[in-house]
Amino acid sequence: MEIKTIALDREAYDLLKAQKASGESFSDVVKRLAGHRRPLSDYAGIWKEIPKGDLKKIEEALERGRELDRERLSKLLRRLG
């Protein structure tokens, strides 16, 4: 079996480690998480059944996530100067 070394920052490592089950290797975790891809077409029309109020909450949560991403990026760019 060929082995490759990858670098992860601390946050990525901690996230991966949190997904690791007892007796599972990091390779097992990556295969488990990355191996469950569904075709995009499986999701076609999925939103049409969701009530409008719930869609509004989802949109607000997405926007808040985008705001947090912009704030994090801004802080990072300031640190990198």
Image: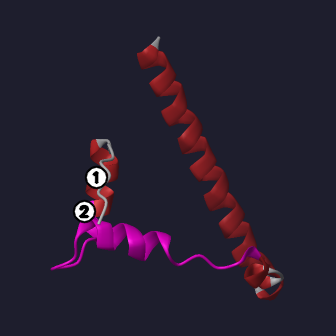
Q: Give the range drawn in magenta.
A: 17-40
**Between 18 and 52, which is closer to the camera in this rendering?**
18
Q: Is residue 51 above or below residue 80?
A: below
- Which class describes the residues within 10 Å of circle 2: few (<14), some (14-19), or many (20+)? few
> Horizontal placement of 75 versus 20: left or right?
right
Residue 33 counted in the magenta span: yes
Q: In which quarter of the image is residue 38?
A: bottom right
Q: Mark 2 points at which residue?
A: 17
Residue 12 counted in the magenta span: no
**Between 36 and 67, which is closer to the camera in this rendering?**
36
Which residue of the protein is positioned furthest toward the bottom in this rendering? 49
Q: Which residue is drawn at 44% across and 16% down?
A: 80
Q: Name the residue under label 1.
A: 13
Q: Residue at x 43, y 72 (%)?
A: 33
Quadrant assignment for the N terminus: bottom left
Question: How is the rendered protein coloured?
Answer: secondary structure
Q: In which quarter of the image is residue 48?
A: bottom right
Q: Residue at x 71, y 78 (%)?
A: 39
